[in-house]
Image (tube, helix red, strand yellow):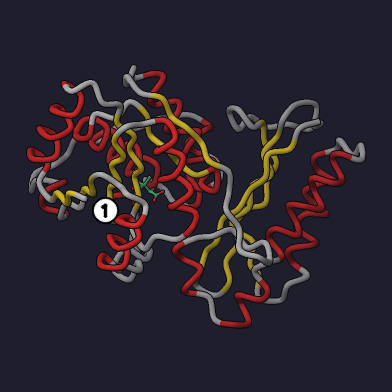
Amino acid sequence: MRIFEEIKKIQDWCKEQKMLGKKIGLVPTMGYLHEGHLALVREARKHCDIVVVSIFVNPIQFGVGEDFEVYPRDFARDTELLEQEKVDAVFAPSNEEMYCRDSSTRVEVTGEIAEKLCGASRPGHFRGVTTVCSKLFNICLPDLAVFGQKDAQQVMVLEKMVRELNFPLEIIRVPIVREADGLAMSSRNVYLDPEARKQAIVLNKALGETAEAIQSGERDTARLKSRLREIIESSPRAEIDYAEIYDAYDLADVSEVDKQVIVALAVKFGRTRLIDNRLVEV
Ligand code: PAF
């Protein structure tokens, strides 16, 4: 497995791979890998000859007072896991390599899709994500990039960016990977103390009950959201940031569920903010 830290070196290598006719799959990550990330790697492998994984904790997608400094990092373990997956190359640049001192170019998707949910709670977050992913796409030249459905709004924003800026690549979404008790896998789960970890399963429970209610015929979004909040609030440590139901394609408001919707949650347990979601068909 090749490990690259410099943009020029991996870009030249990716160009060579493409000249050899290889199809490149990119899995962008911030490291501290878990089974959810490995599912993305395996999906990329199904479609591509070359799998590149980027590991970069992207400073510009974190707001002031967020967890950039303490975001969990374990490069040695990450590379060991990726070796086992037979990944071809890892791109792990420094902040200075990715953002030159006077870096001021940003890529931004505007509108509801980027401004609701995490866009409202974390101003500037998606601008950081779309900027770094644009750079990664230009550096690694992927034919395909793989993202997890856990970060549903992120993947929706990135799909819109790829469509509208004509990046020559396909985005693939991989379903959420959960722990045995239903908690969605996330690098941030390590922040949870044992009691918060126990209570955090309420997210998946709330999503499941909402999906069941819709499938049993409840269509009224206000009633569904009120029940959703009630279930989450039954966990004393849970503090809701948002609990919403929107159109699954563009996050438009829906008052009656008459098409595929996304039930989306962001809930804090102490200082740890977890997100989760479920797509529900009618
Ligand atoms: O989902 C993540 O880990 C990050 O937001 C991403 C896509 C790697 C961009 O930094």
Q: Position of residue 155 (x, y in %)?
A: 48, 37
Q: Position of residue 131 (x, y in %)?
A: 28, 37
Which residue corresponds to mark 1?
56
Q: Position of residue 6 (x, y in %)?
A: 9, 46
Identified at 58% across, 71% down, the residue is 269
**Residue 135 found in image quarter:** top left
Identified at 30% across, 47% down, the residue is 87
Q: Which residue is at the far right?
A: 217
Task: Answer left or right for 280 relative to 158.
Answer: right
Identified at 29% across, 31% down, the residue is 24
**187 or 51, nearer to the observer:** 51
Residue 232 lies, with reference to residue 103, above or below; the image says below
Decide: few, some or many residues near mark 1? Use Cα within 10 Å; few <14, some 14-19, many ≥20.
Answer: some
Q: Amino acid at mark 1?
A: Phe
Q: Position of residue 22 (x, y in %)?
A: 26, 26
Locate the C terminus and report the quarter of the image it occupies: top right
Q: Is mark 1 within 8 Å of ligand 1?
A: yes
Identified at 70% across, 41% down, the residue is 245
**123 or 199, nearer to the observer:** 199
